[in-house]
Image: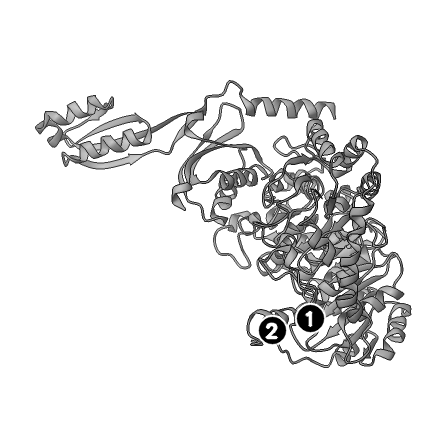
């Protein structure tokens, strides 16, 4: 407890069990009365605890903490750990374990956690004795939050939990084999600046690295000085406000049309804190072949992993961006920027307007997101589940503040939304949290409604119900001869479920009732469920079919 | 596909903590690359272990593997090399039937010709040892096997030191320690 206190932990998401009982017993005193220094949020399933910790970390910039028991308790967290690994989210998972004398005996609720977690965590370690606690906990937080952040797993055998020692605080802020912040190479910066100064058609790709490095202002200064248009990855959406004049939209398979095509026309591509995911690049063999590539990243292993670079600047972008800004010439690229406009207009007419302002027919997901964004507070946090709800929500929501997006980008974890939104309400208690989910993902961690009920967590849940696993259904229609194999889903009565949990609920079927329902949702204190009856075959567009070239993006099917 | 591949040697230095070998091999497993040979031992730097790993791969892939290994928290350094950048040795042990060795003088001549040494002799078996490059050790096995006298044969993993003039790992650690005191 003291070790967690020393790391500034305030909120713990957890679920007790046999092998973690000594810690929970200590926690009893630290969550009430004079000694109170933590809030413990009892979740309803351990996977929910990890996603909640992720949501908490994403909006607050602090390390999210999860406390669970051994065996099934911790195997349930593995999805969340893998999710945090792929999306560079700092969480620390502390799990009970059988006493070291019982390790390897197939004892009750024993699993080899360190072995299981190794490939999906930044560090996993077993605290075998009480005297290691202070060091291991401090090291865990240091590793989770520094450099490229990620999940750390501490396996805590019961004997080490009950051993009595004289408490000696330890602070880890140096590991000789671990270089979290590589030294900026000024020669690389000079080369990058030269490429940018000679560029006629520069394009910046902004990723979550900018948010993680807290370099949003440095990014603006850089882009504005040389007048460089910038696309954002899904996880980097709020690194640059939606209304910034240099923002040219979202990258990727379902991103914006112009920026996807322009990736194939630019002469210098500047990737900042992003990792050229296959969902961004499409076919790597044809991707941005005409361009000189500059890659700014804190993680050396990302350089040349997917896209070969001409200049790599390996450093924290909080440091590399200002260094680069200092060397680039003030510039304007008016003609280049204006060349986006006809493509943007085309997308607006063909895709956006029909999606957000449909005249007739059943409700569409785009119009729901757009209508919520119109009424939501400027500093609202967007949380999404995975699937069509995620693609529509990230496309049509508006971002004004940094750290405003929680979504499972890398792992694509259905069931992420609801628990992540719970975490976000604790990580940013002053901000509105809007969570868009489909009927599939809503049910994947539906038990967390219990946590929302108990905590009165003010999650504004927008359930977009089309009775389908919509994204897979869309792919079946597009690529699998319309054979809708097990994507149609029978749903429960969500109103009755909301009632069961005592959560206010409204259903929207008619377009004319939408604005009113959103107002009701946003002005009601505490949690709220707004269920919208969605057109069954609403498709997300535009789309670059998987493995195709980004300039083959389709505006219609 | 196989034709494009070359044999690369990775030299990995890590802290002496449990589970590192697992983490290193997992990087290979994830890409379904076979490890050809593996040697682990304490290095000349106190507390630092050295892994010598060989694998068939192309340069792009071995580069990615190396960087993913180096990214592990307790791995100090990881680099990959081709054979010309290294001084390489392996050892071969050959357990021969003493009866057959005595019966055919050509066997001892072969052992001497290959620069191998006889390290132990008893009435049942004779132990021959050879250090050298992989193909030399295999060649000696084939030569001895032709006499039908080999009871057991084993070959060690490769060990290697770099031909470069700089000791990069010690220099890296010195710099890290210096940086620490300045912080």
Task: Judge left or right: residue B118 versus residue B167.
Answer: left
- Earlier in the chain: of badge 1 and badge 2, it is 2
The residue tagged 2 is A477
Front position in the image: A422 or A198:
A198
Looking at the rendered structure, the secondary structure element under dot 2 is: helix
The outermost residue toward the top is: B165
> Please, is residue A47 above or below residue A494 in the view?
above
- Residue B112 percent location from the top left of the image: 20, 21
- Residue A301 percent location from the top left of the image: 60, 40
**Mark 1 to mark 2 CA distance (whole Å):** 10 Å
**Quarter-wise, where is residue A393 in the image?**
bottom right
Disc 1 + disc 2, Cβ < 8 Å:
yes
Residue drawn 89% across and 66% down? Answer: A375
The residue tagged 1 is A539
- Residue B35 percent location from the top left of the image: 42, 41
Note whether residue A10 is visible.
no
Front position in the image: A301 or A175:
A301
Do discs 1 and 2 share a chain?
yes
Note whether residue B117 is visible.
yes
Residue drawn 47% across and 53% down? Answer: A105
**Quarter-wise, where is residue A250 in the image?**
bottom right
**Quarter-wise, where is residue A422 in the image?**
bottom right
Front position in the image: A453 or A328:
A328
The quadrant in which the C terminus of chain A is found is bottom right
Front position in the image: A201 or A226:
A201
């Amino acid at each position: 407890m003291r070790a967690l206190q020393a790391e500034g932990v305030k909120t713990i998401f957890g679920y007790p069990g046999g092998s973690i009982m000594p810690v929970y017993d200590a926690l009893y005193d630290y969550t009430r009365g004079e000694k109170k220094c933590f809030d413990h949020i009892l979740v309803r399933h351990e996977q929910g605890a990890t996603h909640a910790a992720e949501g908490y970390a994403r909006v607050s910039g602090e390390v999210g903490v999860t406390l669970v028991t051994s065996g099934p308790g911790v195997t349930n967290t593995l999805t969340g750990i893998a999710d945090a690994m792929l999306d560079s989210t700092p969480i620390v998972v502390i799990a009970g374990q059988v006493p070291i004398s019982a390790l390897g005996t197939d004892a009750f609720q024993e699993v080899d956690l360190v072995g299981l977690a190794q490939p999906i965590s930044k560090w996993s370690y077993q605290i075998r004795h009480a005297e290691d606690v202070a060091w291991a906990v401090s090291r865990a937080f240091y590793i989770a939050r520094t450099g490229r952040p990620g999940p750390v797993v501490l396996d805590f055998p019961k004997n080490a939990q009950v051993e009595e020692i004289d408490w000696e605080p330890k602070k880890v802020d140096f590991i000789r084999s671990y270089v979290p912040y590589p030294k900026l190479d000024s020669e690389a910066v000079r080369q990058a600046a030269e490429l940018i100064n000679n560029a006629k058609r520069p394009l910046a790709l902004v990723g979550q690295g900018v948010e993680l490095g807290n370099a949003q202002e440095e990014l603006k200064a850089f882009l504005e000085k040389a007048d460089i248009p910038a696309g954002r990855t899904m996880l980097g959406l709020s690194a640059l406000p939606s209304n910034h004049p240099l923002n040219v939209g979202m990258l990727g398979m379902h991103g914006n049309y112009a920026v996807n095509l322009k990736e194939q026309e630019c002469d210098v591509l500047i990737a900042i804190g992003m990792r050229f995911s296959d969902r961004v690049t499409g076919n790597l063999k044809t991707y941005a072949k005409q361009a000189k590539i500059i890659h700014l990243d804190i993680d050396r292993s990302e350089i040349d992993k997917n896209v070969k670079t001409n200049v790599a600047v390996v450093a924290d972008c909080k440091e590399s961006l200002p260094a680069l800004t200092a060397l680039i010439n003030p510039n304007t690229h008016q003609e280049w920027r204006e060349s986006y406009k006809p493509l943007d207009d085309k997308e607006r007419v063909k895709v956006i307007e029909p999606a957000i302002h449909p005249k007739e027919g059943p409700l569409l997901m785009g119009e729901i997101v757009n209508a919520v964004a119109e009424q939501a507070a400027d500093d609202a946090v967007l949380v999404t589940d995975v699937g069509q709800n995620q693609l529509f929500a990230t496309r049509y929501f508006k971002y004004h503040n940094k750290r405003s997006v929680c979504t499972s980008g890398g792992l694509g974890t259905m069931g992420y939304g609801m628990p992540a939104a719970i975490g976000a309400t604790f990580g940013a208690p002053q901000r509105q949290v809007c969570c868009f989910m489909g009927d599939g993902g809503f049910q994947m961690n539906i038990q967390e409604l219990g946590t929302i009920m108990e905590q009165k967590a003010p999650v504004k849940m927008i359930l977009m119900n089309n009775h389908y696993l919509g994204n897979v259904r869309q792919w079946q229609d597009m690529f699998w001869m319309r054979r809708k194999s097990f994507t149609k889903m029978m749903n429960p009565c969500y109103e009755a479920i909301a009632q069961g949990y005592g959560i206010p609920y409204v259903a929207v079927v008619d377009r004319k009732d939408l604005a009113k329902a959103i107002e009701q949702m946003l002005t009601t204190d505490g949690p709220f469920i707004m269920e919208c009856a969605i057109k069954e075959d609403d498709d997300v567009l535009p789309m670059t079919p998987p493995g195709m070239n980004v300039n083959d993006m389709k505006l219609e099917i | 596909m196989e034709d494009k591949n070359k044999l690369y040697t990775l030299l990995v230095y890590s802290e002496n903590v449990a589970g590192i070998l697992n983490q290193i091999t997992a990087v290979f497993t994830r890409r379904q690359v076979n490890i050809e040979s593996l040697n682990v031992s304490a290095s000349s730097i106190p507390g630092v272990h050295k892994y010598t790993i060989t694998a068939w791969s192309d340069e792009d892939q071995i580069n990615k593997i190396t960087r993913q290994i180096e990214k592990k928290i307790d791995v100090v350094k990881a680099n990959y090399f081709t054979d010309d950048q290294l001084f390489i040795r392996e050892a071969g042990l050959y357990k021969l039937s003493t009866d057959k060795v005595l019966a055919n003088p050509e066997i001892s001549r072969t052992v001497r010709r290959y620069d191998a040494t006889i390290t132990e002799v008893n009435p049942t078996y004779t132990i021959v040892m050879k250090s050298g490059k992989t193909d030399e050790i295999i060649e000696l096995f084939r030569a001895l096997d032709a006499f039908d006298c080999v009871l057991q044969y084993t070959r060690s993993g490769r060990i290697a030191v770099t031909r470069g003039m700089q000791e990069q790992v010690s220099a890296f650690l010195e710099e890290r320690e210096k940086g620490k005191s300045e912080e």
